[in-house]
Amino acid sequence: MYTPPLYRRILLKLSGEILAGEQGFGIDSDIVDQLVGEIQGIADLGVQVGIVIGGGNIIRGAQAGAAGMDRASGDYMGMLATTINALALQDRLEQNGIDTRVLSAIDMRQIAEPYIRRRAQRHLEKKRCVIFACGTGNPYFTTDTAASLRAMEIGADVLLKGTKVDRVYDKDPVANSDAKPFEEIGYLEVLQRQLKVMDAAAISLCMENNLPLVVFDITKAGNLRKVLTGEKVGTLVSGTS
């Protein structure tokens, strides 16, 4: 039975680490196939999909900075890593019949279109999946912040963070067996508790613009579609919790 989606346009945030799978580094083709399957699963709902993907499976700017490299240089390297991931995801999406565009915040016209807000909106209106690469194009900003920013710019109805954890917890569920999950939580509580949902800048941006955020396990088959059709999956972060 067809269930109409709750949202017309979404921004899906994926961490680079998800693409690495169990190998911990690089791109696991089976994981990419799984993610493509999740996106395909919502194609018939008519939802317009934007994606921001991290580069942590290849390099993270903060880690490079901690190792002695200039932080800005490390961040630019991380932005290039997001482009590698974006192209890998685009290739597999198009092999599965999903028209896709990669828009980059750093100009590299041979492999991606430059990011222009109105162009991104037009692609979405034409039912093309749009992958935003290179974060914000500026060092010292994470791809979490880029996801919040792009969500605002394209007029997304919700920001979805696909992770390997089923919900937001009051503490690390891997290290603490007594960790308690939240079904709903407010932006301020996330900031006050310093919960590792997204970085503080990203959460603050969502709060200031009243953009709902759903954190859910994207590695479980069908979860993306369940979120979009209103099933109780993951944790809702909003201003009314």
Image (tube, rainbow, N blue to C red):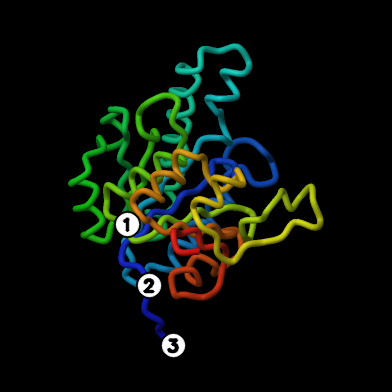
From the top left corner, tell me how far across and down residue 19 is, in percent. Answer: 57, 45
Q: Which residue is mark 1?
A: 156
- In this picture, is 108 found above or below 165? above
Crowding near the residue tagged with mark 2, few <14, some 14–19, many ≥20 C-alpha atoms within 10 Å = some
* Circles 1, 2 touching at the beta carbon (< 8 Å): no
In this view of the protein, can residue 28 be seen by the observer?
A: no
Three-letter amino acid code of the residue under disc 2: Leu
> Which numbered mark, 3 or 1, is in the foreground of this view?
1
36 shown above or below 139: below
Q: Residue drawn at (27%, 55%), measured in percent from left and top?
A: 155
Task: Examine the image and state in which quarter residue 115 appears.
Answer: top left
State the CA–CA distance, disc 2 to disc 3. 16 Å
Residue at 45% in and 35% down: 82
**Mark with earlier residue (1, 2):** 2
Looking at marks 3 and 1 on the same chain, the residue that comes earlier in the sequence is marked by 3
Going by the numbered disc 1, the residue's amino acid type is: Ala
Residue 136 x/y as whole percent: 36, 33
Where's the N terminus, which quadrant?
bottom left
Q: Residue at x 60, y 24 (%)?
A: 63
Tell me the crowding category of disc 3: few under 14, some 14 to 19, or many 20 or more residues within 10 angstroms, Cα based.
few
Residue type at mark 3 is: Met
